[in-house]
C-alpha cells in the first residue's frame, strides 16, 4: 500500500539539508587552514558570515531527516485549491512536515515544485529539492517569524557584505576585487540611490543608517514568501548586494556565485583544486542560489499558466 505523502514530507527539513551541513563544516575547516597560512587574503566578512549561526538557515536541527528515500509515487500533477495551487502525488495531496496541505500562491511556482518531485527517480533525494524546502518553510513557519524578522535577517549582512570587505594585499587580489566587485557595488548605489562603500577594516564599511532605511523600505514591498527566498539567497552568497543584483536581474546566477566565491577561486588558482570537492561545492551553491532566485521571482509572479499534468 502506498503511504500518504504526509509520512514522506514529515521527513523533509525546513531550511538546510544534511549535505549543506557537511559542506559548511568542510568550508570552515578550509577557511581555518587558509587563514592560518595566509591571513591577509581571507575575506573577513565571508569568514564571519559562514561562522554565524544566527540565521535559521544555519541553525542546528532538532532532527536529522534522511537524505534519500525510495520513491513511492508514479505521477505528479498540480490542481487549484481554495488557498492556491496544490501538488498531487498520484491521487494524494502533498503535505508539509506539520501536516498542512502543501499549497503555493502561484501556478508557476507549483509547476516548478512539481518538477522537482517529477525529476526524482528510484529514490527521492530530499537534499536536491530546494524549492520544496523553501515552500515548507513558508507554509509551516517553524520559527514563527514575521516580515520584520525576515527583513532584519537579510539586512544584517550589509555590515559584513562580501563585496564590501576588501583586502590590502596581495596586489593581484586587490586588483581582482576592484575589477569584479566595484561594478556591482556601483550598480547598487545608483539603483537604490544610496551610499555603501567598501573597507579593508576588519569590521567592514560603515553603512549609513539612511542606506539601511532605504533597503528596509524596499524589502518591505515584498511578500513574506519572497522575503524567505531573499533571505535564503543572502545567506548562501553571504552578500545582500549580490542577492539584490539577482532579484533585479542585473546578475546571472553563475556570475553571482563567482562573485561570492571570488577569493576562494583566487586561492584555487594559486594553491590548486582539492580533488572534486571545490567543483562539488560550486555546483551545490549554484543550485541553491538558482532555486532561491527562482523562488523569489515565482512568488512575485502574477501570470497564469494553464493546468498542466507533468506525466501522462
Image (tube, rainbow, N blue to C red):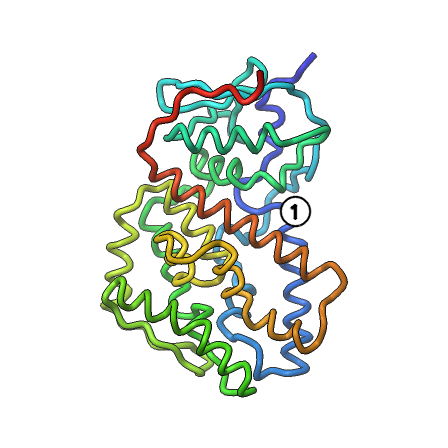
From the top left corner, tell me how far across and down residue 175 is, in percent: 49, 82
Residue at image coords 62%, 31% = 119
From the top left corner, tell me how far across and down residue 46 is, in percent: 52, 69
- Answer few, some or many: residues within 10 Å of disc 1's Cα (few below 14, many 20 plus, some between 14 and 19): some
Residue at image coords 61%, 45% = 17
- Residue 139 picture quarter: top left
In front of the other: 251 or 140: 251
In front of the other: 22 or 275: 275
Task: Name the quadrant of the C terminus.
Answer: top right
248 vs 231, left or right, is: left
Q: Which residue lies under the disc numbered 1?
A: 18
Residue at image coords 29%, 68% = 189
From the top left corner, tell me how far across and down residue 204 is, in percent: 42, 77
Task: Name the quadrant of the N terminus.
Answer: top right
- Residue 251 picture quarter: bottom left
Give the vertical position of 311 relative to 142 (above or below): above
In front of the other: 61 or 253: 253
In front of the other: 112 or 17: 112
From the top left corner, tell me how far across and down residue 230 is, in percent: 41, 50
Q: How many marks?
A: 1
Amino acid at each position: 500500500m502506498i503511504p500518504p505523502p504526509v509520512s514522506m514530507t514529515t521527513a523533509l527539513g525546513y531550511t538546510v539539508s544534511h549535505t549543506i551541513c557537511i559542506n559548511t563544516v568542510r568550508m570552515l575547516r578550509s577557511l581555518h587552514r587558509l587563514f592560518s597560512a595566509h591571513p591577509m587574503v581571507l575575506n573577513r566578512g565571508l569568514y564571519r558570515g559562514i561562522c554565524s549561526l544566527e540565521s535559521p538557515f544555519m541553525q542546528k536541527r532538532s532532527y536529522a531527516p534522511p537524505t534519500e528515500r525510495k520513491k513511492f509515487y508514479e505521477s505528479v500533477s498540480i490542481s487549484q485549491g481554495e488557498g492556491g495551487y496544490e501538488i498531487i502525488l498520484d491521487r494524494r495531496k502533498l503535505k508539509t512536515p506539520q501536516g498542512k496541505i502543501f499549497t503555493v500562491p502561484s501556478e508557476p511556482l507549483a509547476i516548478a515544485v512539481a518538477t522537482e518531485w517529477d525529476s526524482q527517480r528510484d529514490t527521492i533525494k530530499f537534499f536536491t529539492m530546494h524549492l520544496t524546502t523553501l515552500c515548507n518553510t513558508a507554509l509551516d513557519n517553524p520559527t514563527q517569524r514575521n516580515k520584520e524578522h525576515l527583513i532584519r535577517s537579510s539586512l544584517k549582512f550589509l555590515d559584513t557584505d562580501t563585496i564590501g570587505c576588501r583586502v590590502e594585499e596581495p596586489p593581484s587580489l586587490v586588483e581582482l576585487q576592484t575589477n569584479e566587485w566595484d561594478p556591482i557595488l556601483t550598480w547598487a548605489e545608483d539603483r537604490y540611490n544610496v551610499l555603501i562603500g567598501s573597507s579593508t577594516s576588519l569590521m567592514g564599511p560603515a553603512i549609513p543608517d539612511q542606506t539601511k532605511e532605504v533597503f528596509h523600505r524596499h524589502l518591505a514591498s515584498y511578500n513574506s514568501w519572497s522575503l524567505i527566498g531573499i533571505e535564503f539567497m543572502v545567506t548562501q552568497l553571504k552578500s545582500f548586494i549580490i542577492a539584490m543584483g539577482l532579484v533585479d536581474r542585473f546578475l546571472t546566477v553563475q556570475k553571482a556565485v563567482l562573485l561570492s566565491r571570488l577569493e576562494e577561486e583566487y586561492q584555487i588558482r594559486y594553491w590548486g583544486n582539492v580533488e572534486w570537492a571545490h567543483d562539488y561545492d560550486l555546483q551545490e551553491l549554484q543550485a541553491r542560489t538558482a532555486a532561491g532566485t527562482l523562488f523569489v521571482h515565482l512568488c512575485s509572479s502574477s501570470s497564469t499558466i494553464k493546468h498542466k499534468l507533468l506525466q501522462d
